[in-house]
Image (cartoon, rainbow, N blue to C red):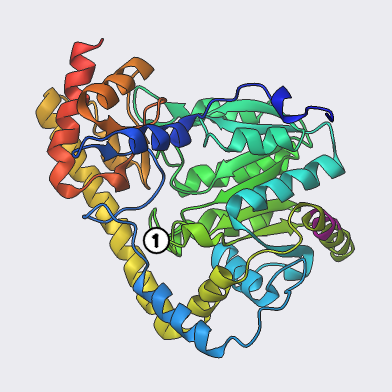
Amino acid sequence: MGTILFENFPDQPLFGANLVAKQFEEDNRDDKLDLGLGLYKNSNGQTTILQSVKKAEARLLEYQKTKSYLGLAGDKVFSRRLAEFTMGPDQAWDRISLAQTPGGVAAMRIGFEMVRAARPDSTVWVSDPTWANHIPIIKHAGLRIQNYPYFNQKTGDVSFKAMVKCLEKMTAGDVILLQVSCHNPTGARLENHQWNTICELCAKQGLLPVLDVAYQGFGSGVVEDSYVSSLFASALPELLVAVTCSKNFANYRDRVGILAAQSTSVHAANRTSLKMLDLINALYAMPPDHGAAIVSDILSNESFRAEWEDELSEMRERLAGLRIALAAAMRRETNSTEFDFLERQQGMFSMLPVTAKQVDTMRIEHGVYIVSNGRINIAGIPENQIDRVAQVIAKVRQNNK
């Protein structure tokens, strides 16, 4: 018998939303409610295909004549269109290397592999808390991780002064991961004037920002949510931008994204592009084309884009309405304004002031599933379940202090 390899793997339990998804699947109750997994759901609890996506896909099936390789960088026309959508058209594009990627995770992984190749001893600063998957992405790239203050659990807002104080102590060459809108998992947001301060500090301290762009259009609007990416690209010599279309185009399983890397010069950008392609060749060789071709068509077709922006606006406005309704329901249930932060926040997620034990009670006794750190997917709450969710939260907090 040959050498045994796979039995040597240590136990590695599921965590976060993946654990919630497994527990939810195994629950046989008819009234169970999944508020853990990061999917936008409509009032009927369904994640549907956007009409604009359906129309662009139908046209794609008509005109696409081949399934041949695109090359390591993927569809260059798509990448440029999405980059301009994200960062604005007026950038130094001869200094920006672009590659299509299989979603935002792949974009970040390639970006952090580039950081390691350029400076193996780099420290990556992430918000406290951050999206759970950020940590393994960075760790598997072999980089050190530190936390910067971000969220004030008592107020539900950003701990801006503490965040600034931490940035002022960072070392030149450090990397800082920033979510540009609709922060996951907290929903807490920075105002534009605060982003101006963060950008100035990145320049002053010599930091390399990595912008995670996952929810453009879910915050204040398509154009409004591009403010940070455009600002940082215009103001800083170097920058990484990882973009996913999973949420705003609702094409989760198609894996559509890009990585943009801004260098200090055209010469440096050429070398950056070669390194980016070298890493892509080793990790996945070529991205899938189907979903990217659909997004590219939507962004370039006036009719498709107008319909898509209307659909995205409808999702954004519904999210805002759900937040207002849940905050109002919590005021009724708790006779307090403790949960008013829900209205101020943006995007799909918020972090509730609950313990892991209280989260377990919500799941076991009431069939309401959220992540153990208190993250709740606002977009997963049907309108007719708002009062039930508020009642469960209030009851569990009162009885399990």
Task: Give the x, y percent position of residue 95.
Answer: 78, 64
Percent position (x, y) of residue 60?
52, 83
Residue marked by disc 1: 221
Q: Left or right: 342 with respect to 230?
A: left
Q: Secondary structure at mark 1?
A: loop
Going by the picture, which residue comes out furthest to the front? 1
Q: Which segment is the magenta one? A: 275-279
Mark 1 belongs to which amino acid?
Answer: Gly
Vertical comparison of 21 with 320: above or below: above
Q: Quadrant of residue 307?
A: bottom left
For the residue pair 344 and 277, the one nearer the viewer reads as 277
Tell me where residue 393 sits by quadrant. top left
Q: Quadrant of residue 123?
A: top right
From what the image shows, is residue 95 above or below residue 213? Answer: below
Locate residue 201, reporting x and y percent. 65, 39
Residue at screen point 35% across, 30% down: 156
State yes or no: residue 126 in magenta: no
Residue at 56% over, 47% down: 196
Residue 161 image offset from top left, x and y in percent: 51, 28
The quarter in which the C terminus is drawn is top left
